Amino acid sequence: MESNPYSIIKIVFFAGMLFLITHCCFSKNTYIYSANSKDTIILDITDSYFFQGCKYGSQENFNPLTVILNRGFEMLRITSGQQYYNPLIPYYKFDNVIENLSHPFQNIKTYGTKDFFKEQVIPFGNIDRPYWYPNYTLHLIGGGITYTGLKEWFEFNKIPFPKTLSAITILGSALINESIEEKINDKGFRLNVDAIADVWIFDIGGILLFQSKKVNKFFSKTLNMRDWSKQPTFILPGYNLANCGQFISLKWKLPKIKNWYFFSMIGLGGIVGLSYKFKNNTSLSVGFGQGPKKKQNELFGLPIDVSLVPMGGIYFDKNNSLMASLEFSNSKKDLYHNYFAELNIYPGLLKIHKLDPSLWIALAKDGNVLFGIGTKYTFGLCIGYK
């Protein structure tokens, strides 16, 4: 196969992006801003779904930078197998990702069209290789929710072309994510249909699907889904990252049971449990499930399989904006992020001289303690020291 990825991508990939971005610019925004108290939702939007402008919790941290870090670099949590990781590694394989994306039909045919759809697209098509599961949960639904949330964030901050910028952020973080998954490859082209399914079908599909008001309403009002991502932490000295990962919460009201909800956290792995809503619009949620550990298997030289380990978590939120979380995992080797316990405290829970500090503390399996500290002025980021 002739490889000239950077010229091909301008014709094929970005031509598709241009169509998508142009499509996203047509609809008009009908948003109304109000100035309420600092401790309440300050955004009165007739069509607001996933971002209400809360000046506390995970919504205070939600912005394009944290989205890029959480969506783009979360695979380093397990591919590196380290407690923290260097995002400036020299062997990102953007060229191989672009080469695969620029010849989607040919590469799918080479891999096997039937196997591709059974593994990547059709739910339960291949139980042994259920790559369709993260495609639907993280890329289609999670990506669509993040797209709408970012669009609302840009509108809230009165930045023009909110749909265009949101789509660019989603697809940019997707390319970073796909390149990280290929970072261990040697030189030369390697077939990667996973990237084709992720980007062309599910990332773009999520953006298009969530153009629908009915879809946004169902996931935001009926299922109460919100972005409860981690607090990316820069570990000093050096350029190391830690605590990156995108997670989406779900709270579905249980019928005939007052204040109780079915609860789930969707991300790399997932948990299920129950949530109770108090009168002051705060909620306490508890869940158990499985989280991933270091990738171990390969296919065509790509580390594609993620083994799962038991985990559980306790979550406290206000108006669906996560205020604090405490997660546990119990595995003797290759822990998810190599942590036994992880505490995240978001801005607004602690009040110290109007700083609204945020905090991340992790207890590693080897006994080491990692931490990061931020404030409402650090744009959703924390700073730690090793």
Image: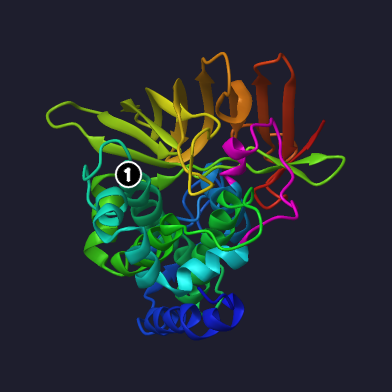
- Amino acid carrying mark 1 in the image: Tyr
Left/right of residue 81 with respect to residue 274 in the rendered view: right
Asked whether residue 161 is in view, the answer is yes
Q: Which residue ends up furthest to the front in the rendered image?
A: 1
Residue at 73 percent of width and 26 percent of height: 370
Please state the extent of the stretch shown in magenta in the rendering.
74-93
Residue at 42 percent of width and 80 percent of height: 16
Instruction: Using the rendered view, name the quadrant where residue 238 is placed.
Output: top right
Near mark 1 (Cα within 10 A), the count class, few <14, some 14-19 or many ≥20, is some
Foreground residue, 104 or 37? 104
Left/right of residue 146 with respect to residue 81 in the rendered view: left
Residue matched to label 1: 133
Instruction: Using the rendered view, name the quadrant where residue 223 is placed.
Output: top left
Left/right of residue 261 with respect to residue 362 in the rendered view: left
Examine the rendered structure and indicate whether residue 32 appears above or below residue 311: below
In the rendering, at what x and y percent does residue 43 appear?
Answer: 46, 60
Q: How many marks?
A: 1
Q: Secondary structure at mark 1?
A: helix
Inspect the magenta stretch and tell me whether residue 286 lies in it: no
Foreground residue, 282 or 219? 219
In the rendering, at what x and y percent does residue 136 appear?
Answer: 32, 50
